[in-house]
């Protein structure tokens, strides 16, 4: 009898310890988000949290509109382990891990299929490894936001001549800056958090971002015209601090990776339908949408001829570019 009592007590104690451990180890992670509500970044974050919460005891909270700092600040914070996750534009990862600049070369990505092929294939896997090594953060998901179309408050833009005299905001990203220079204008690098105010006050005339960002940030209130340039397909990775990731047990690590994959698939699937609705809504709000003349041929030639060679070395060599082009079924340079 005494033996049975001891066994029962031991089992109760073990169960109590397991329960206590589970309670203590349950986490509510912080996820920094550069954009506001209604954008691709928020949608990716929500899907990630949904998947993570469904398969673990952990959850997470989104902090929108740069509440936890600028997008580049969040890379720093995640690198040193003071921030768990961040969702940000790929161009803000490039200063920390230059090889991901491959994804921001003008006209490298020419469709959603191209974006998926590069991020989810062998090239994407290598970029993830490089980012872990260079920046101390791990890419676990990708938001696909579409092409960064050009908006402005002055006039319709169809040709490069129409750009003359425009003050265009760009992120502090050398590839994007050099792209605009190849088109004959000096862009104005400006922090994302200052962009709406800059447009509102007329400090800058225009900017480029995907339709969903223009909609989520209510740029229609300060911009009239959109031009469907397709020089850069906006990809927004979900990163996790590598030190935070390594602190998790194997089951949690696997759940984090699985939730990132599910959120990535969701983002790709929802992009096309959401863009159609958003374009219609922006037109309804008074924005005018035009296409570049002659299929954007002049824009493409100037940007690829002038910009690509400048960045071969930083992204890992011309061979890396040709590897990407081959993966997309295009001719090598």
Image (spheres, rainbow, N blue to C red):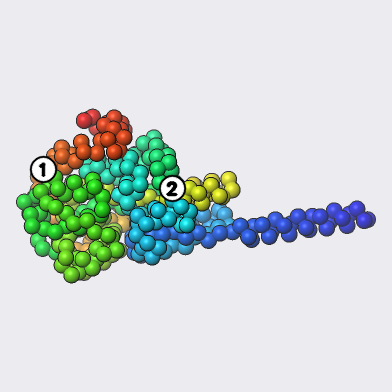
Tell me if I can see residue 328 in this picture.
no
Is residue 121 toward the left or the right of residue 156 in the image?
right
Q: Position of residue 11 (x, y in %)?
A: 79, 55
Q: Which residue corresponds to the image point at 24% horizontal and 42% vertical from the top-left?
A: 105
260 vs 16: above or below: above
Disc 2, SS = strand
Q: Quadrant of the C terminus?
A: top left
Residue appearing at x 26%, y 53% in the figure: 172
Figure quadrant of the N terminus: bottom right
Which of the two residues, 21 or 78, is positioned nearer the viewer here? 78
Whether residue 27 appears in this view of the structure is yes
Quarter holding residue 68 = bottom left
Q: Which mark is residue 137?
A: 2
Residue 196 appears at what percent x and percent y?
Answer: 24, 66
Q: Position of residue 141 (x, y in %)?
A: 42, 48
Q: Residues within 10 Å of mark 2 (few under 14, many from 20)?
A: many
| Above or below for 244 versus 308 | below
Q: How many marks?
A: 2
Image height of 217 relative to 131, above or below = below
Q: Is residue 304 left or right of residue 293?
A: right
Does label 1 or label 2 sit earlier along the sequence? 2
Helix, strand or loop status at disc 1 = helix
**Residue closest to the eye, 6 or 158:** 6
In the image as oriented, which residue stretches furthest toward the left? Answer: 161
Give the residue at mark 1.
Answer: 298
- Quarter location, residue 13: bottom right
Question: Who's the residue at 15% across and 37% down the image?
Answer: 305
Q: Which mark identifies residue 126? A: none
Q: In the image, is 304 to the left or to the right of 268? A: left
Q: In the image, what residue occupies the spot 83% across and 58% down?
A: 9
């Amino acid at each position: 009898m005494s033996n049975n009592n001891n066994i029962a007590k031991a089992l109760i104690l073990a169960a109590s310890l397991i329960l206590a451990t589970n309670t203590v180890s349950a986490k509510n992670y912080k996820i920094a988000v550069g954009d506001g509500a209604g954008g691709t970044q928020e949608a990716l974050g929500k899907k990630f949290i949904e998947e993570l919460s469904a398969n673990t005891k952990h959850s997470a909270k989104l902090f929108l509109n740069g509440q936890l700092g600028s997008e580049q600040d969040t890379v720093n914070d995640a690198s040193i382990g003071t921030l768990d996750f961040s969702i940000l534009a790929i161009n803000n990862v490039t200063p920390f891990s230059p090889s991901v600049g491959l994804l921001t070369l003008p006209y490298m990505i020419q469709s959603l299929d191209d974006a998926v092929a590069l991020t989810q294939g062998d090239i994407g896997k290598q970029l993830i490894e490089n980012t872990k090594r260079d920046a101390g953060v791990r890419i676990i998901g990708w938001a696909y936001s579409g092409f960064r179309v050009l908006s402005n408050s002055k006039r319709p833009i169809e040709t490069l001549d129409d750009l003359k005299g425009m003050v265009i905001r760009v992120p502090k990203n050398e590839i994007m800056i050099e792209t605009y220079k190849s088109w004959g204008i000096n862009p104005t690098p400006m922090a994302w958090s200052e962009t709406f105010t800059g447009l509102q006050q007329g400090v800058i005339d225009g900017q480029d971002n995907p339709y969903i960002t223009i909609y989520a940030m209510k740029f229609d209130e300060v911009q009239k015209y959109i031009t469907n340039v397709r020089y850069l397909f906006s990809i927004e990775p979900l990163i996790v601090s590598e030190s935070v990731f390594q602190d998790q047990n194997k089951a949690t690590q696997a759940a984090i990776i699985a939730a990132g994959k599910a959120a990535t698939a969701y983002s790709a699937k929802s992009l096309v339908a959401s863009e159609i609705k958003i374009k219609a809504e922006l037109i309804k709000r008074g924005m005018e949408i035009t296409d570049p003349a002659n299929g954007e041929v002049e824009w493409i030639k100037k940007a690829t001829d002038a910009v690509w060679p400048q960045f071969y070395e930083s992204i890992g060599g011309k061979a890396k570019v040709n590897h990407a082009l081959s993966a997309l079924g295009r001719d090598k340079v």
